[in-house]
Image: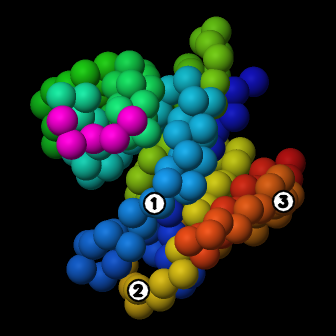
C-alpha cells in the first residue's frame, strides 16, 4: 500500500513559515536540495493546499528560466509531470498536471491508495497536513530542521489532542547545519 508522507522545511521552534509569512530561511543549499530532489523521485502523486499550489506554480514554467542551474532544471523536470491534486474551495481551475480534489481528503487518499501506481502520496502544506494527521492518514513525517527560531507562524506539526508514536527511520546532518529527521508512524 502506498505511504502518505509529509515532508517540509521547519524552524527549530516548529514553524514552516514565520509570523510575517516568510520562509526565506528554508532556502536549501546544494546538499539539502539533492535530498529534496531524491525524495520527490519517490512520489507518485502530490496533494497540495491552495497556498502551496500557488507557490509551486513557478515550477510549471521554470524550465524556461535561463538562470536555473542543472539541479533546479532536474527538479523542474521531475515536478512538472508529477500528478498533483489541489484542495481548494476558492480556485476555479488549476494548471499543469494537476486537478482539483473531487472529494474530501480521506476519500482522495483512499482512492489513490486503491489505484495501481508507484510512489508515495505526498502531502504538502501545513494546513492540509494537519487535517490528514488529525484523521490518522499520515504514515511518515520527514522534517528538514533549520537552525533558526522564527517565533511563531504556521506550525509544521498539527495541533490536535492525540498522541502519535513514531519510529525513527533516518537522521542526517548537513554541512549547512540542517538536520533531517525521517519518522514512520508506529501502527
Residue 17 % position (x, y): 36, 71
For label 3, the SS is strand
Q: Which sits earlier in the primary sequence, circle 2 or circle 1?
A: 1
Upstream in sequence: badge 3 or badge 2 = 2
C-alpha gap between disc 2 and disc 1: 17 Å
Please, is residue 45 above or below residue 186 in the view?
A: above
In the image, taking residue 78 as reference, residue 1 lies left or right, namely right
Category of crowding for the residue at label 1, using alpha-carbon neighbours closer than 10 angstroms: few (below 14), some (14–19), many (at least 20):
some
Residue 47, image x, y percentages: 44, 36
Q: Residue at x 38, y 19 (%)?
A: 81
Q: What element carries label 1?
A: loop
For marks 2 and 1, give the one nearer the viewer.
1
Cα gap from disc 3 to disc 2, whole angstroms: 26 Å
**Percent of width and height locating residue 128:** 44, 51
Q: Is residue 173 highlighted in magenta? A: no
In the rendered image, residue 18, in percent from the top left (x then y), is placed at 34, 78
Label 2 sits on residue: 150
Query: Which residue is disc 3 drawn over?
Result: 168
* Relative horizontal placement of residue 58, taking residue 102 as reference (left or right): left
- Which secondary structure class fits the magenta region best? loop
Label 2 environment density (alpha carbons within 10 Å; few <14, some 14–19, many ≥20) = many
The residues bearing labels 3 and 1 have C-alpha atoms spaced at a distance of: 23 Å
Pick whichever, 179 or 13, lies toward us.
Answer: 179
Q: For numbered disc 2, what is the local secondary structure?
A: loop
Can see residue 102?
no
Residue 68 counted in the magenta span: yes
Pointer 1 residue: 28
Residue numbers of the magenta segment: 65-70
Amino acid at each position: 500500500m502506498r505511504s502518505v508522507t509529509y515532508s517540509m522545511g521547519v524552524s527549530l521552534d516548529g514553524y514552516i513559515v514565520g509570523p510575517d509569512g516568510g520562509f526565506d530561511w528554508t532556502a536549501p543549499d546544494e546538499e539539502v536540495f539533492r535530498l529534496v530532489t531524491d525524495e520527490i523521485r519517490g512520489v507518485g502523486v502530490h496533494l497540495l493546499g491552495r497556498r502551496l499550489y500557488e507557490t509551486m506554480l513557478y515550477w510549471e514554467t521554470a524550465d524556461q528560466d535561463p538562470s536555473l542551474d542543472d539541479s533546479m532544471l532536474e527538479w523542474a523536470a521531475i515536478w512538472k509531470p508529477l500528478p498533483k491534486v489541489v484542495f481548494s474551495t476558492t480556485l476555479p481551475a488549476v494548471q499543469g498536471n494537476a486537478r482539483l480534489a473531487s472529494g474530501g481528503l480521506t476519500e482522495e487518499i483512499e482512492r489513490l491508495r486503491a489505484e495501481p501506481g508507484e510512489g508515495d502520496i505526498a502531502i504538502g502544506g501545513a494546513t492540509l497536513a494537519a487535517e490528514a494527521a488529525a484523521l490518522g492518514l499520515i504514515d511518515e513525517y520527514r522534517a528538514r530542521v533549520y537552525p533558526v527560531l522564527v517565533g511563531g507562524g504556521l506550525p509544521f506539526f498539527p495541533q490536535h489532542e492525540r498522541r502519535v508514536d513514531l519510529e525513527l527511520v533516518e537522521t542526517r546532518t548537513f554541512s549547512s547545519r540542517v538536520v533531517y529527521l525521517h519518522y514512520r508512524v508506529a501502527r
